[in-house]
Image (cartoon, coloured by chain):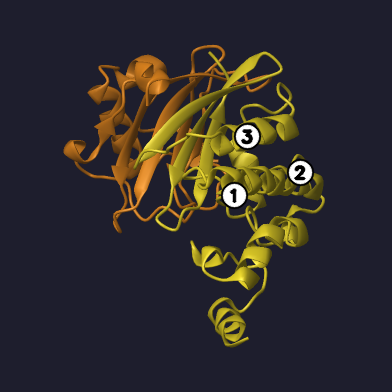
Amino acid sequence: MGFRFNVGLKHGNSCDPLVPGAHRQDPFLSIVWFLTPFICPATALDKDTKENEGIQGVTLDDLATISMVYGMGRLTLGLAGRAIGRITAGSGLPIRFGNDANQIRHAFRHINGVVDRTKAISAITNDLNTSGIVLNPGLNIRKVIVDGVELTFHAFKLPDGTINIGRITLPR
Amino acid sequence: MRTITIDEFEFAARALASYGVDPHSIGLFKESLVEPMADGGMGSLRFYGSNVSQSNRRMSEAIVQGEFNDRDGMLVSFTINLDNNGNLFELDLWRVDFEPLQRLPSQSDEIRIIPTHLNDVR
């Protein structure tokens, strides 16, 4: 209980991200870590969900979808990790497409009307959750294919493990 | 809409020159009209040339991409994009932690140009 109290003091909000690695040391935090994407759908992407409501192209459905994919990735990798005794580095980490609705819309602006945004989010999230993926220090430029269209996206892994996605573009 | 600032112009011109592109050849001038983009203060600009049709404009390609470090050391990635008619379209700045940009680099050696063909291997 003492540890829970400390976590509450440190984060102030049960939906804030946990200290990286903390879930591996405490059974309670393991449960929180696992459930966070389901009960706090905006945590990984955008803390201010109200800003996203009603803004064209950025809906709570999108965020929920990302959370679902992210959560399922955790479930799959968590089970696989237990089965093989390890979890792939970089998997299950928060993925953000912006700090607010404008930045999320900005990141996706080049694919609007060409590629379904939800599918793009799913493809990028899956790519980053792929077993064996190691993001280099600095900028990472990766590609995914959505409905036959190759998307290029830029990813950067912050020191706390969060992966930021900032630019998504179509082929020339 | 407003005229590009001298800092923005010099940064873009310097980046283009590093890549061997004459700024004037793609329509970058000190009088260029720009619109700051709603990117949370990261500094991205949309260009509006006087003879450029604004209908159905889309990004075609990034002719320059690179990076520099902000005042606090945080990495900032940038691209200069052309539209589907070959006109100057955007200066896209992405501070990788999504925080507002603090400054544009004032020296050429602060800018690291990334060859676009490295897209496939980085």
Q: Are marks 2 and 3 on the same chain?
A: yes
Which of the 4 quarters of the picture holds residue B77? Answer: top left
Q: In the rendered view, would you say A63 is above or below A149? A: below
Can residue A19 be seen here? The reply is no
N-terminal label among 2 and 1:
2
C-alpha distance separating marks 2 and 3: 12 Å
Task: Please state the horizontal and vertical placement of residue A132, each as a whole percent of the image.
Answer: 48, 34
Which of the 4 quarters of the picture holds residue B53? Answer: top right
Q: Is residue A92 left or right of residue B19?
A: right
Instruction: Select label 2 or label 1 by which is in front.
Output: 1
Q: In the rendered view, would you say B17 is above or below A81? A: above
Q: In the rendered view, would you say B51 is above or below B10? A: above
Amino acid of disc 2: Thr
Q: Are marks 2 and 1 on the same chain?
A: yes
Which of the 4 quarters of the picture holds residue A3? Answer: bottom right
Chain letter behind tag 1: A
Mark 3: few, some, or many residues within 10 Å (few <14, many ≥20)?
A: some
Q: Residue at x 43, y 52 (%)?
A: A158
Chain assigned orange: B
Q: Quadrant of the N terminus of chain B?
A: top right
N-terminal label among 3 and 1:
1
Q: Which residue is mark 2?
A: A65
Amino acid of disc 1: Arg
Chain letter behind tag 3: A
C-alpha distance separating marks 2 and 1: 25 Å
Mark 2 in CB contact with mark 1 (< 8 angstroms)? no
Q: Which residue is mark 3?
A: A126
Chain assigned yellow: A
